[in-house]
């Protein structure tokens, strides 16, 4: 019996060692700390990465710096928008999207109510009229050339404004936007939750464009969109396919967790975003789950919307629009 016990213990040790050997290290860059990245927060904090055999190191690199870190080879994966992916491909970068964890833009344009009142804001007016209120204002956009910047510029363009001269864009991160608006450093923002709810509190600010939960969105062609793409070099998936397989599996399991475990997801979101107000946490979760598909796949329609956002924002000329989206995404890792 003692010998049997020793053999069993040895077998368990071998099994554990084999399991540890299967764990692979990977790195992920996040452009900011915002709810649109909830699937990645859940994958880390709920132990999903560990379950699929990944040891993931996260790094926050503002805006498109996250994608640039992947392109340079210093980071394995990034959370980047389809706006960034299509623009990178148009510039001949050998990258690919392997999942889309969020299919709404995730952003609103919000301005101080005092300014809106002075300009006779009508929330029921056509988008082109509402967009004109941005003229002459200073708008926080998170990071230059990222999706919140693209959204702000596209909305301004719809209002007949020149996005480069008719208003000022300020690269202020989401965590600092609330304070900047309260202090008067900026007049508005291209922003999502929880800062959105915090700014709307006590009627301090009003929404002039809703690119996420409106039905239809502002503008209607914006949904669905590839808003949070798992962005990776093609070389990574070719040479280390198991990393892409495991990352895809983690995103599928994270999406299921977001839908099936509201309390757990809220707890993770609250911890990540340092939220304490139950109402803000609940509203943030509501928005997160509404844009998180149970199947985090990518498709040409979502990438076409992202490509159009690039063009409407003036990030790319019409001539640079991709002729096809074949080859810039795959769904083989999110089955």
Image (cartoon, rainbow, N blue to C red):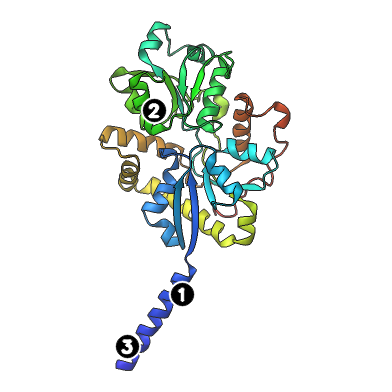
The reply to whether residue 229 is in sight is no
Q: Residue at x 44, y 39 (%)?
A: 32
Q: Which mark is residue 333?
A: none
C-alpha distance separating marks 3 and 1? 20 Å
- Mark 3, mark 2: which one is toward the viewer? 2
x and y, in percent, of residue 26 in the image: 50, 57
* Residue at the disc numbered 3: 5
Q: Residue at x 40, y 11 (%)?
A: 116
Between circles 2 and 1, the one closer to the viewer is 2
- From the top left corner, tell me how far across and down residue 228 is, in percent: 51, 41
Residue 177: which disc? 2
Q: What residue sits 42% from the left and 20% below the top?
A: 188
Earlier in the chain: of badge 3 and badge 1, it is 3
Residue toward you, 33 or 257: 33
The residue at the point 44 percent across, 70 percent down is 20
Query: What residue sits right under mark 1 in the picture?
Result: 18
Q: Secondary structure at mark 3?
A: helix
- Residue 234's spot in the image, x, y percent? 64, 52
Q: Is residue 12 above or below residue 86?
A: below
Q: Residue furthest left?
A: 277
């Amino acid at each position: 019996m003692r010998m049997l016990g020793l053999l069993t213990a040895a077998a368990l040790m071998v099994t554990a060692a084999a399991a540890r050997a299967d764990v692979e290290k990977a790195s992920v860059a996040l452009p900011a700390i915002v709810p649109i990245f909830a699937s990645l927060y859940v994958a880390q904090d709920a132990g999903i990465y560990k379950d699929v055999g990944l040891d993931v190191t996260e790094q926050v690199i503002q805006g498109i710096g996250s994608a640039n870190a992947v392109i340079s080879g210093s980071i394995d994966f990034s959370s980047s928008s389809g706006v960034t992916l299509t623009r990178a491909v148009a510039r001949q970068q050998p990258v690919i999207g392997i999942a889309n964890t969020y299919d709404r833009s995730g952003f609103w344009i919000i301005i101080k109510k005092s300014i809106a009142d002075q300009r006779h804001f009508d929330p029921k007016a056509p988008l082109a009229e509402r967009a004109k209120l941005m003229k002459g204002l200073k708008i926080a956009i998170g990071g230059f050339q990222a999706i919140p910047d693209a959204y702000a510029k596209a909305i301004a363009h719809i209002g007949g404004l020149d996005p480069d001269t008719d208003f000022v864009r300020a690269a202020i991160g989401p965590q600092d936007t609330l304070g900047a608006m309260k202090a008067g450093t900026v007049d508005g923002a291209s922003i999502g939750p929880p800062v959105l709810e915090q700014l709307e509190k006590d009627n301090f600010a009003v929404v002039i464009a809703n690119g996420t939960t409106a039905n239809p969105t502002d503008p209607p062609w914006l949904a669905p969109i590839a808003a949070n793409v798992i962005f990776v070099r093609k070389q990574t998936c070719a040479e280390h396919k198991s990393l892409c397989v495991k990352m895809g599996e983690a995103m599928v399991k994270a999406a299921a967790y977001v839908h099936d475990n509201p309390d757990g997801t809220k707890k993770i979101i609250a911890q990540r975003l340092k939220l304490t107000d139950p109402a803000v946490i609940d509203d943030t979760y509501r928005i997160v789950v509404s844009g998180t598909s149970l199947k985090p796949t990518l498709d040409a329609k979502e990438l076409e919307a992202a490509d159009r956002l690039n063009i409407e924002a003036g990030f790319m000329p019409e001539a640079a629009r991709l002729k096809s989206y074949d080859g810039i995404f795959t769904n083989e890792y999110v089955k």
